[in-house]
Image (tube, coloured by chain):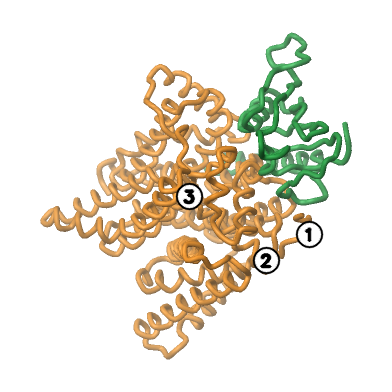
Amino acid sequence: MITDGDGLSLVATALLGLWCLAGWGPVRRARHAEPAAVRSMLSASLGLLLAGLGLGLLSAIGVSWSPAAVWGLALVSALGGLGLAERTGAAGAGRGHFPTFRSALSSASSSIRSLRPEVMGSVRTIELLVLAGAASLFAAASALRMNVHADYVYHWGQKAARFALAGGVDLKYLAQPWNAYLHPDYPSLLPALHAAAFNAAGLGWPVAAVLATAFFVLLLFAIRALADAAAKSAPGAALASIVAALGATAFAVGFRQAGGADVIMAAAVTAAVCVLVRPATRGSDFDVAVVAALLAAVKLEGLPAAAALLALHALRRVSAEPGARVRTALATGLRSAGPTAVVVGVWAWLTFGHGLFLESNTGAFDAARLPTVLAGLVKTALLPDWWGLPLVLAALPALALHRRLRFAALLLLAQLLFYVYSYTSGPVDTAHWIATSAARLLFHLVPAALVLAIAAADHWTEPLEED
Amino acid sequence: MGAALVAWLLLGVAVESSQAIRFRLADPWPATEPALWTPEGQHVESLRIASGQLSACLYQRGLDGELLAITPDPALGPQGLYWSLWVISMLPDFDLRPVGADGSAAPARYLVAGAPRAGEGPLCAVEPLWLYDLGGAP
């Protein structure tokens, strides 16, 4: 029996810290010159991915996710990441053996100094305070069980508990026909992370609440990074960041999103939009590689988003280097799509190789359902819990006219169209399906769309076709 | 414009938080964490699947562990009914039919009848569910 008091939040937080450290080294090595918000976003994303892949590897070779195995894997990964960061820091800065720790301390010190009374009025400080408040509110709501996601009860939590008890991915359990409602064909990153945390820190909601908060903080990092990249001015970036963070908080608390996959999906989509706004350089191939793999690892809906991100990024890179189209496209594709190919390959092997794929996930496009789908989506956008925010999605075609924001808006549009296609093709009652899922799916898109819309307004004085 | 938008969303955060608090206070979340349930052979017990934002519903199980009835929380309206039906529709080998309908389009009570999966013991079909013990028969 899992009791109410089981699960130590601080221990789970330490485990999450180790996972993120594992991603910190490679990101520092590849993207050390990028803004802190971008590096944080990428480090956390990569760390979670590496943890998921490591756990999958343990499961594949028959090593149980015992506390020792989970902590051992996390420690080895974190030390590897730290070592990589140290070597990068020493080589890049030439300041001895521990420049990373010094720079981290210096950065923390600067952050604290920036909160002195004379700068408290600055717009970026207000933004930071709002983001910190948003994270705190979500964390408190999660810890107090005010916003437990239905799908945590319905399938994510069940799979996680089962994996924790089984010590790995329990394919036999997933393949049982009466477990179809558990979505056995969903990627197993989320239940695997939960299961490992359960075994390391205790099986109970407090641990799941820590993971939920971490995913929400990742969303806030992505929002801030996107706002910085997309807006023209500091006040514009701050406003975009504040609005998106408040909107995400209102929905994620009021519509109860802790413990599900939609927060981390929103974070991954926002991160994808961010990398499509930032300059398309060879270095950005790394960013795309990390974010696309995370998208593919989170939910089935992430697979088309990952494909769209990879395609749009390749298009941008080719456009940026018109002299070497084929070579550039191939090199970009190889560099940026490799991790996604690994994630999708593992998922496909597990899903199709073990009979987990549900036929209900496929169906033929039925145009006759379009009126029902569109009416359902409009009704969803007007739900009181959304405070009108999804209406910003109607601006995506206009945002796609803006040269700087074009590819980012196209990604969101492509994902929105995929959702419309899914609703018109799934072999289930359309109105019922929309009523039970559309509000959450819109959450994947709304934070990024809000930032883009405010950024576009910030660029208002520029001609639409100019950067 | 920006200030108005921020003020609107601050109101949104406040309202949504207060609603979440009310939901939490009104929700008799069980003293125990949801567990992988194993049958213990009680005659009748009330169980609930808390399904978050959309609904909560009451289950009753009979002597042999079969599901007897599912009662969506009437305060949650049609969406609660939707969600309850969605959950119950995923349970195999059970036949769902409305009973006690008062003539409205959305009857408040549904009877779930059917036999457990043959050869796999009672309750095997509901074993994987998180179940919440509300402590006694309704």
Q: Which mark is residue A201?
A: 2
Name the chain under label 2.
A
Q: Which mark is residue A187?
A: 3
> How many other residues sit within 10 Å of disc 3, few (<14), some (14-19) or many (≥20)?
many
- Position of A52 with respect to A71 (left or right) is left
- Numbered-mark total: 3
Q: Amino acid at mark 2?
A: Ala
Circle 1: element type:
loop
Query: Do tags 3 and 1 sit on the same chain?
Result: yes
Q: N-terminal of the two: label 3 or label 1?
A: 1
Q: Determine if residue B126 is in view.
A: yes
Q: Colour of chain B?
A: green
Q: Position of residue A58 (x, y in %)?
A: 50, 66
Q: N-terminal of the two: label 2 or label 1?
A: 1
Circle 3: element type:
loop
Name the chain under label 1.
A
Name the chain under label 3.
A
Residue at image position (59%, 56%) is A163
Q: Which mark is residue B31?
A: none
